Structure formats: structure tokens, C-alpha cells
Amino acid sequence: MGKVVSVKGRWISDKHIKAYKEGIFSNLFKAIKEDPELSLEIRMNDEAKVYYRKKKILTTSLSYSGKFKVTMLDKNYYKGKKAPSINIGDMHNLRSLTLIRKYFGEAKRLVYFNTVGEEFSFQQSIALGNHSFANRFLVVDMEWEFSQAGIKSSDRIKITRPDLVIVDTEKNENGFNDIYLAELKVGTGAKDGKSGIIDHVDKTFNIIQKPEACAALINDVKSIIANKIDLGIITGEPKEFHYDERPKMMLISAYRGEMEREELEKEAQKACAEAERIGMEKPVCILYNALIKL
């Protein structure tokens, strides 16, 4: 598949990867991999960020001078409360798996009581369950965002941050692998307001229509996959992908009863109708029964 190096895109350097596999971050990586509630995501500027319930609780970065830096949980998560007792930014503490686990435990508790929401854990479960080339769908990234930093303000577009970026490991009828910008809905409580499905469809269409955004997405997908293969996050026999130049939308809806299923089906129909109205290909709609039967 080949290593993709992108100065502007989402990728981390070989030195950064080596630090996770066998260097200063090896115990940190071990703690992340053993905790199914944590996810390591590749970001711009040679940064890797650890998320819990969509919230960033740790960042590792490599400066131009070659020095590693660790940034802890933002202070806004513990205003009026005790900060994590472990300074995980201390490189000495990063050698202790016990201290790392303690930091993550404390940071997770602070985040949990700050932002409780069922979609967070469901999104994480989908990502963890689709990190293999053996699956039909491969989750590449969470909360991807098109950077418009270098674009004139008059040319900028209103965009959404898709919950998941997903690659179809099977080729479409034209011989290309589709990239999906996926929105996740759990139940019916978060379908209205500013984050309503019509708004998501319109803003996703803005991304699909902008060549610069499509090119940035494909570039990021290539580099993130390469990094995550090196780190062992994505498993299985690698496949050679040929990406369709325009991404598509996916709507994943999880229901916990017949009433929610009916309501979410109506939301999917609204999404398809809006897509047809604006000239966008209909989103792929997946309904998932979230009830656990014993």
C-alpha cells in the first residue's frame, strides 16, 4: 500500500510511530490498546490524540527540533474539581504503566461527568469493531474535519464534522472504493435542532461538492491507514484501494425498540428526500438494533 507522507494532512512521522511501538510511548500505547473506551487518532502537524467519549484527554506531538511533548486533559474539564493527580506530561511518568492507567482513569471520570451521552460509546464501539481489512467496512477516522485555514473567507463553506470516516473494502460498480462520511444517531433524542439530519445532509453535500475537500479527505485516508497499519490498530491483510474521487454519505441509526425504529426510518427518508432535492446521491442508511438479547 505504501507509506504516504503529507505535510498538510493527517499523519505522524516514522519517529513518532517508533516511539509508540518501542520507545517512550510504548507503555502509553499499551494502556490505550487495553482500554476499549479509548481511541488513538491521527491528526495534523505530527500529532496523535487520545479520545474518550469524543473528548480529547491526551495529545502527543513531535516538534521540528525532534522533541516529544505530551499535553494533558484541558482544564475546562475540571473547573472547581481536582486535576488528575498524575502529571503524564512528565516523561519519567510515561515509563510507568501503573501511573498511565491511573491518569487515564482519573481523566475519564472527569470527562464522563462533564459530557454524558450514549452516542459517544456507541460510536467508539463501531470504530473498534471495524478496524480490520477483513470487514466490509473499515473505520479510518472519527470526527474528521476539512481544514479551511488556507482558503479565502469568501470561498469557505459551511461544513459538518462526520462522526466516522469509513472505507468500503469492496469496489463499487465503477471499480473504485467508496469513502463514506458517516453520521450516527442513537435513538431519537438528538435528531432535531442544529444537528438535525437535513442540516447534516446539506453540509455533507458542501464537502462532496468542493474538490479541495475531497482531495484532502482522500489524502488523509491514505496517510491515516498507513499510520494505523504501522501501529497495528488496523489489522488483517492490507488491501490495495482505489478511491472514488467523491465521498458519499452514510447514516447509521441505532434503535432500542419499535417506536424508535419507526422514527429513525422517517429520519432516513427525510435524509434521502433532501439528498434528492439538492442533487446529491442518496445516503446509505443502516438501521441497527441496539438491544442486546440474552
Image: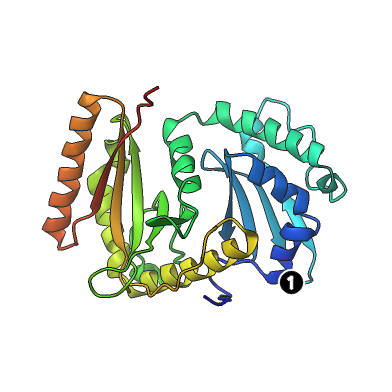
In the rendering, at what x and y percent does residue 162 appear?
39, 52
x and y, in percent, of residue 32 in the image: 66, 45
In terms of image quadrants, where is residue 16?
A: bottom right
Q: Position of residue 199 (x, y in %)?
A: 26, 48
Q: Secondary structure at mark 1?
A: loop
Dot 1 amino acid type = Tyr
Residue at 38% x, 63% y is: 169
For residue 18, side relative to residue 247 (left or right)? right
* 263 versus 72 height, above or below: above
* x 24%, y 55%: residue: 202
Which residue is found at the position 63% from the left and 57% from the top? 48
Residue sticking out furthest to the top: 294
Q: Which residue is mark 1?
A: 64
Q: Is residue 255 left or right of residue 28?
A: left
Name the foreground residue: 197 vs 264: 264
**Residue 268: x, y in percent?**
20, 43
Q: Is residue 277 left or right of residue 219?
A: left
Residue 272 vertical placement versus 260 (above, below): below
Q: Is residue 13 visible?
A: yes
Q: Quadrant of the C terminus?
A: top left
Q: Residue furthest right?
A: 92
Label 1 neighbour load within 10 Å: few <14, some 14-19, many 20+: few
The residue shown at (56%, 68%) is 226
Q: Is residue 72 visible?
A: no
